[in-house]
Image (tube, grey):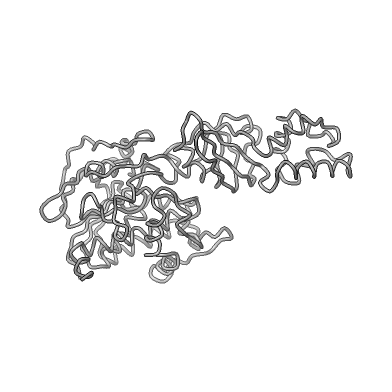
Amino acid sequence: MSNRHVLVIGAGAAGLTAAIRAAESGARVTLLNAHPKPGLKILMSGGTRCNVTHQKVTERDYFGGSRNVVARILRAFDVQQTLDWFEDDMQVALKLEDTGKYFPLTDDANTVLDALLREAERAGVTLRGGQRVVRLTRVANGWRAGIQRVRDASSLGDAVSGSGQTEWPLPAIHPEAWEEADAVIVATGGLSYPRSGSDGTGYALLNSLGHTLTPPVPALVPLTADDPLCAAAQGVTTDVALTLHQKGAKPQKFEGSLLIAHFGYTGPVALDLSRHFSGADPATRRVTCNFLPHADHEWLLEDWLARADRESVRTVRRHLGTWLPDRLACELSWEAEIDPGRALPQVARARREKLFSNLLARDLRVTGTLGYERAEVTAGGVPLSEVDASTLESRVAPGLYLCGEVLDVEGRLGGFNFQWAWSSGTVAGRSAAKGRDAEREAAR
């Protein structure tokens, strides 16, 4: 049994998991959370239902750091172990949906958060909300954390800055209290939903200790656009393929459901692309949409000519309606200067070609994203090369462990980021409780 004191900073999914695992391994655990209420991002996730994990998770579902390291962490606590932990240990009944996503049977994220909090209490974790760590310094036998008491949660989020920062100054705040520990786990998250407490202070703490940062950018966030299609087809959902283009880089393709909104584009495919758009060169990046991913120009032409020959009165609107929602079909027709009510044989070749071009590679005129306030996760953070691949201990500051979103790892939409939180939190918590001396002893 360990008698080490482990301090965990951040009571989100990764931090709660790390605290529970460290306590289960025998450590005395103190869990500090900047916001008075823990786990707020858990409650907001999955449309407030909390997508706990996915049926199949591999390192290929993640971006950012080394996939070999990601695979190693995922193997340490995999999907089946996650399901067993929730259903058997925490008595949270889960259901598998057709999309491969697991949700609590209650369809309520509170079920997940309440179970984690009960498990933390059972394990003996001391949870203190409204305590923001603003300093971390080394002492002879471990660490000393400077704490600011958060009296007004509305002040959280003030540290958030624009994308692309690699250096983060510590907030000019004098600590009101200090906490000493043998090991520290940083699970402060990124910058998404900053009012929940993930406002960049974690980056500043790690930066001050010598860690570098892959520039953070919003990810899994809706795209904004200056596009008349958004007004004409607002509320329309359809399956598409989006391609991100930028000078000097290979085009990146994403497939899935697209929702056209008044401000731009959202839905799974837009959210998955957003991380790459945020990190692309603003001067050359652009997004095109294939509204018929199953088709190409040759197929469209052959089908059009065959239909026109067999059904001379078949309209463009009816023809496109085979694959597309009506409002979208009509708008794309008008953009090609074709009356949707015109019969196929009556459409001039040049206008037909313009319509095909719009169907297969229309520029979506994306201008940006809705930013961290609407981003589900943050891309970027501390590179995986700066932590031990087996323990997630810092290579820069021994005795410091990192997990969750603060690392340069983010998954695609569908429960993958929660799986990273459970897996990385488990590894960091168990490792911090053991400490380096115990690991050396076990290796002998």
Residue 427 falls in image quadrant: bottom left
Q: Look at 56% across and 38% down and name the residue there.
A: 265
Q: Is residue 425 left or right of residue 417?
A: left
- In which quadrant will I find the N terminus? bottom left
- In which quadrant will I find the C terminus? bottom left
State the count of labels: 0
- Please determine whether, in this image, residue 20 is positioned above or below residue 307: below
Q: Toward the viewer: 153 or 5?
A: 5
Q: Toward the viewer: 351 or 425?
A: 351
- Please determine whether, in this image, residue 383 is positioned above or below residue 5: above
Give the x, y percent position of residue 153.
31, 41
Give the x, y percent position of residue 297.
72, 41
Q: Is residue 93 left or right of residue 113?
A: right
- Please determine whether, in this image, residue 31 is positioned above or below residue 442: above
User: Most extreme residue toward the left, as rendered?
Assistant: 140
User: Most extreme residue toward the front, as rendered?
Assistant: 248
Q: Is residue 74 left or right of residue 166?
A: right
Q: Toward the viewer: 126 or 411?
A: 411
Give the x, y percent position of residue 70.
39, 56
Q: Toward the viewer: 120 or 437?
A: 437
Give the x, y percent position of residue 141.
12, 56
